[in-house]
Structure formats: structure tokens, C-alpha cells
Image (tube, grey):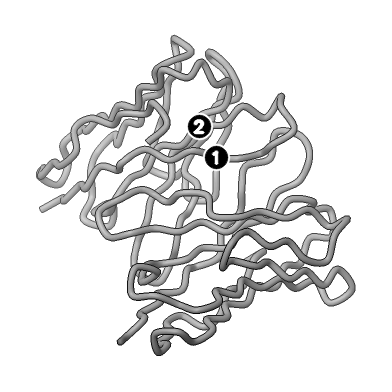
Amino acid sequence: DAGITQSPRHKVTETGTPVTLRCHQTENHRYMYWYRQDPGHGLRLIHYSYGVKDTDKGEVSDGYSVSRSKTEDFLLTLESATSSQTSVYFCAISDRDRITYEQYFGPGTRLTVT
Amino acid sequence: QQQVKQSPQSLIVQKGGISIINCAYENTAFDYFPWYQQFPGKGPALLIAIRPDVSEKKEGRFTISFNKSAKQFSLHIMDSQPGDSATYFCAASYSGNTPLVFGKGTRLSVIA
């Protein structure tokens, strides 16, 4: 998984609680992304970062916030978890300063909101 | 607005047959078209990618065909094997800071 770890790998939480997912990379890539994967919807971009403290919204950003204080860590926070946020969350990284635009994905975090 | 449309949603192919998955895009600024393969419980992994300056790219049993005028590209898996059973995603992107835009995926099952 190209030096990408996600934690936790599985989490069950209750509606209304805050949840933070962590993505950690050892590749020193500039760009980091958070996606959610749901049946019938494929991979949808939540937020992404193009440098430390530089972030932007994706297609499905409502209810999520992110932070990146170090190159290697990108945090995704569900401010008040809802059942509609039950999903598998993937972090990805890329180094778009090179010719290739390849994104490398982490192993995913399965989140269940009850 | 879905920028990349993928079909079919699911596909069953006999072992040794050809698997074909199609994608269509809308944004003519896209200049990078990858295909990702995902096995259950794993993250997607890059399989093969193409840029619009070529009409075809082949890597082993996997071929991307690209039709710029029709704004379509497809993945062909020759001599499909049970080990190819996975979900396949097409995607597109363009120069700059734009992230990949993904299709909704195709679940491929190769049966013996």
C-alpha cells in the first residue's frame, strides 16, 4: 500500500459523536486525499490537501472537516457522525509534481455509525 | 453531474474470454485516464493508464483503447482469469491540482 497506513481500520460509533480518522504516509508526497466508497457510488472525494495547511473541498464534503499540520498526516473528522456516514473511507496520496498523476491508496477504514 | 460514466455495473465472463469495460467522459480538459483494480477488503491499485496522445496502450493482458473524438475509453482484459475477478474503476484527471474523478465501478466475475 505504498507506505500509507490508516487508523483505525474498523470503528463502530454512535450517532452524534465526533470521529477522527488518520492517514499517515511515509512517501513524502505532497498531495493527500480522502474518499468514501459506497455501493453504487464508487469512490467520491471528500477533501484533499495540496500541502501542509492547504486543503480544499471535494464532491461530498458536508459534515466532514480535515486538517494537515505535517506532510505525513492527514486527518478526517466527522464532526457529528450520522448513519449516512457509514462507509469505507480511503486515503490516497500522490506526487503530482512528477509526470505521473498516479494516486496510491491506503487499506481503508470501515466506519459504522449506529 | 457525473463527469465519468462507467458501464456495465457488473460483468460475468467465462475463463479465457475477453472482458470489456467502458467509460465516457464529459470534460475535454481531461488528459490522464487510469484504470484501478480493487480486490475485496483492499484499496484500489493502479492497473494501467493512458494519455490522449495515443489511441491504445497494452500491458500484458490489459489494454486501454482511447477514442478522443467520442470522449470514450475502455479496458479490455484478454484471456480473463478467475484471479481477475475484482472491481474495476475508470478515472480521469487533468493538469494542475485537480484530483481524479472516478466512475462508479464494474464488478467483474470470471467463472471457470
Nearer to the camera, A2 or A88: A2
Of residue A66 and residue A90, the one placed in the foreground of this image is: A90
Task: Judge by depth and name the residue closer to the eye, A15 or B47.
Answer: B47
- Please name the residue shown 23% across and 50% down the image: A82
Disc 1 is placed on an element classified as loop
Q: Secondary structure at mark 2?
A: strand
Q: CA distance from mark 2 to mark 1?
A: 5 Å
Q: Which residue is mark 1?
A: A103
Q: Mark 2 Cα within 10 Å, few/some/many (few <14, many 20+)?
A: many
Check the image and report above or below for A90 versus B34. Answer: above
Mark 2 lies on residue: A93
- x 23%, y 43%: residue: A81
Callout 1, which amino acid?
A: Gln
How crowded pointer 1 is (Cα within 10 Å; few <14, some 14-19, many 20+) is rated as many
Residue A67 seen in the current view: yes
Q: Position of residue A104 (x, y in %)?
A: 48, 38
**Chain identifier of the residue bearing label 1 in the image:** A
Whether label 2 touches label 1, CB < 8 Å: yes
Residue B106 left/right relative to A99 = left
- Describe residue B32's horizontal placement relative to residue A47 as left or right: right
Q: Residue B29, image x and y in percent?
A: 83, 53
Q: How far across and how far down the image is residue B41, in percent?
A: 25, 54
Are marks 2 and 1 in one subunit?
yes
Residue B83, disc: none
Q: Residue at x 73, y 51 (%)?
A: B32
Give residue B30's quadrant in the image.
bottom right
